[in-house]
Image: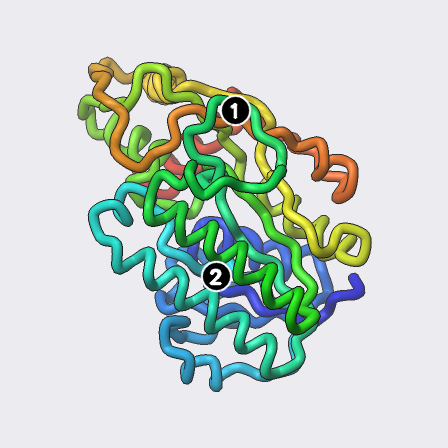
Amino acid sequence: MAIRRVLVTGSSGTIGTRLCERLLQETDCELTALDRRPNAWSEAVQAVTVMADLCDADALAKLPPDFDAVIHLAANARVYELVLDTAKARDNFITVYNTLEFCRRNGIPRVLFSSSREVYGNAEAITHNEEPLHVKHCESPYAASKVGAEALVQSYHQCYGLEFITFRFSNVYGMYDDSDRVVPLFIRRTTAGEDLTVYGRDKLLDFTYIDDAVDGILLSLERFERARNDVYNIASGEGTTIIEVAGQVRELLQGNNAIHVGENRTGEVVKYVANITKARELLRYQPKVPFHEGIGKAVQWYKANLYR
C-alpha cells in the first residue's frame, strides 16, 4: 500500500476499532491510533493508541508529524443526543478544525474524513447520489456539524492543497458498539425481555455492515490517487425499515417482547437509501453483506460478547 504511515482518530469507536484491527492484520502500514477513551474491545488497537482529546489543539503535540494520511473518524455521532446537547455538535466542528490544522502545519498531504448520510436531510428523494448538498435540508445540529466539516475539508483543499476523500456512511452496525444505536439497543432490550420502540412507522434507512464500511476506507487508501478530492456514499444501497429491524432482531433472539411505534423524533432523517454507483466505479467498492445476513452476524456477536 503506497500510503504507509497512517493516523486514525476516533480509534475506540465502532468503525475505528474495526478499521484499526484490519489495518494491523491485513496491511503493512505503520498505524497510530488516537482517542480520548481507552479501547474497550481490542488490546492490539489500544497498544498503538495515543490518549488525547481532539478538542484540545495542544494534545496533538503528542503525535509525530510525518503521517502519509489522517483518517478522521472522531465525532459525537448520536443524532438525537446532539439535538438535546448542542455542545456536542460544537465539539465536532472543533475536532475537525484541529485535525485539519494539524495536517496543514505538518505538511501531511491527505485526509480521509467520515461524514454521514444525515447531510442529505429529509428531501423529496429517498435515494441519493453525491450531488451538492442543500443547507435547507440540514435537519439537526449533528447534520450541521457534518455539512460544515465537509465544507472545511473542501476549503483546506482549495487553499492549502490538502488532498481528501470524504465518506458519507449510513447506519454502520455489526460489532464494537454498546450504545443506544438502534441495532445494539434492540438486541440488548430483546435479550432482557424489554419492549422495543420504533420512532416512525415508515422510517426506512440504509444499514451498512461494519466490514463493508471498513472495506470502503481500505479501498480508498489503495486507490487514493484515482479517487481523491471527492465524496463517496459508503452504504449497502438497500433500504430497510426500522420495523423490519425490530422484527428480525426479535425473531433471531426468539423474543416475545412487544414492538411499539411512536412518532419520528426531531432532527432525524426519515427515509434514505444510498446510490453507491460512484463508489463502485472509482473505489471498486462492493458491499458483501446484505442486511438479512448482517443482522444475523450482529446478533451472534452480541450474544457471544455482551448480551448473554
Q: Which mark is residue 291?
A: 1
Query: Coloured how?
Result: rainbow
Residue 277 position by quadrant: top right
Q: Which mark is residue 113?
A: none
Q: Which mark is residue 11?
A: 2
| Picture residue at 80% right of the left edge, 58% below the top | 225
> Element under label 1?
helix
| Picture residue at 20% right of the left edge, 47% below the top | 84
| Left or right: 267 as drawn, with respect to 96 | left
Q: What amino acid is labelled 2 in the image?
A: Ser
| Left or right: 120 as drawn, with respect to 261 | right
| Picture residue at 46% right of the left edge, 75% below the top | 50
> Element under label 2?
loop
Judge whether 244 appears above or below 272 on screen: above
Judge whether 149 appears above or below 50 on screen: above
Q: What amino acid is labelled 1 in the image?
A: Phe
Residue 44 percent coordinates (x, y): 52, 64
Q: Earlier in the sequence, mark 1 or mark 2?
A: 2
Residue 167 percent coordinates (x, y): 59, 48
Work out whether residue 6 can be spotted: yes
Residue 37 percent coordinates (x, y): 35, 66
